[in-house]
Amino acid sequence: MELVGNSGRHRNKLQSSGLFAPDELDYFVQVYDRIFRESLRDLEELTAVLTAGELRMSDEERLAAIDRIYLSVQDKCLFVMDFNSQTGILALQRGREDVEALRLLTQTNP
């Protein structure tokens, strides 16, 4: 799933950036882990809906379930995109703050 891959790559970037405290990184990991678990549940539910003989459903119920799962996945994708964007902006801001602090230190100490 692209959702899981993007989450993992972004999480790794945040962890290796050196810009976040351990408790912040723990929070990020918890968010991504929750999305991963919920995505697995969606996939399992979709598999059950699509597997012949697994669930007794009318075609209309089956299509409604597929639509519901699709919307759930879409919601997760939008959330991850926003979360990645927000954490990326925070990382950029902190990186700029570090550069500014270093610049000030070098100016005051010739």
Image (cartoon, rainbow, N blue to C red):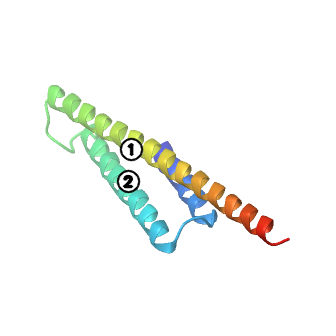
Quadrant housing the C terminus: bottom right
Image point 13% across, 30% down: which residue? 58
Amino acid carrying label 1: it is Phe
Neighbours of disc 2 within 10 Å: few (<14), some (14-19), many (20+): many
Query: 110 above or below 45?
Result: below
Image point 50% across, 52% down: which residue? 87
Question: In screen coordinates, is 41 left or right of 89?
Answer: left
Residue position marked by numbered label 1 in the rendering: 79
Query: Which quadrant of the structure image shows residue 33?
Result: bottom left
Image point 59% across, 64% down: which residue? 19
Residue at the far top: name it. Answer: 60
Amino acid carrying label 2: it is Ile
- Measure the alpha-carbon separation of dots 2 and 1: 9 Å
> Does residue 1 appear in the picture of this structure?
no
Q: Is the Cβ of the residue at disc 2 closer than 8 Å to that at disc 1?
A: yes
Q: Closest to the observer: 48 or 105? A: 105
Residue position marked by numbered label 2 in the rendering: 35
Question: In screen coordinates, is 104 left or right of 40?
Answer: right
Neighbours of disc 1 within 10 Å: few (<14), some (14-19), many (20+): few
